[in-house]
Image: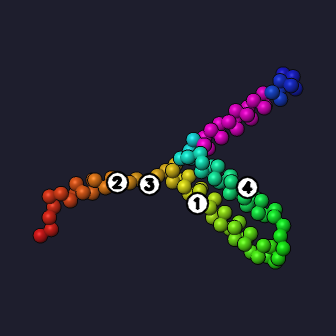
């Protein structure tokens, strides 16, 4: 196998593996918008960290507060995705009503 053929094979295998990872990741999330929201928060955090401003702490601490809140938002998005992938068992409310029919307290 020549060097070019070997590189083409490696690129193909890596590409197929990456496609499988991305397909699996997106398939698990209840809504792809959750992934978009998480990426938007990540980008906002990076932009805020790169921002240069006056004061000590910079921007009167408001930038740091925004970063903390965005990190919290990312944690909540992660929990939302986990919940969507494995929702808790919920009993229908009508079943509860049927259980009590015919049973009267004395």
Q: CA distance from mark 1 to mark 3?
A: 17 Å
Q: Which residue is mark 3?
A: 88
Q: Which residue is at the far left?
A: 106
Q: Which residue is mark 4?
A: 43
Mark 4 or mark 2, whichever is nearer to me: 4
Mark 1 or mark 4, whichever is nearer to me: 4
Q: CA distance from mark 4 to mark 2?
A: 39 Å
User: Can you say which quadrant of the picture contains the C terminus?
Assistant: bottom left
Q: Which residue is at the far right?
A: 3
Q: Which residue is mark 2?
A: 91
Q: CA distance from mark 3 to mark 4?
A: 31 Å
Residue 76 is marked as 1
Residue at left 46%, top 52%?
A: 87
Mark 1 or mark 3, whichever is nearer to me: 1
Task: Point out the tag, 4 or 2, that comes first from the N-terminus.
Answer: 4
Left or right position of 94 against 49: left
Q: CA distance from mark 2 to mark 3?
A: 10 Å
Q: CA distance from mark 2 to mark 1?
A: 25 Å
Q: Secondary structure at mark 4?
A: helix
């Amino acid at each position: 196998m020549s060097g070019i053929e070997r590189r083409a094979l490696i690129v193909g295998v890596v590409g197929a593996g990456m496609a499988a990872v991305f397909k699996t990741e997106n398939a698990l999330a209840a809504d792809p918008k959750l992934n978009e929201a998480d990426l938007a928060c990540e980008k906002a955090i990076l932009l805020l960290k790169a921002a240069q401003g006056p004061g000590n702490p910079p921007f009167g601490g408001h930038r740091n507060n925004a970063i903390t809140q965005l990190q919290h938002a990312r944690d909540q998005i992660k929990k939302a995705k986990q919940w969507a992938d494995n929702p808790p068992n919920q009993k229908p409310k009508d079943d509860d009503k049927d259980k009590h029919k015919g049973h009267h307290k004395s």
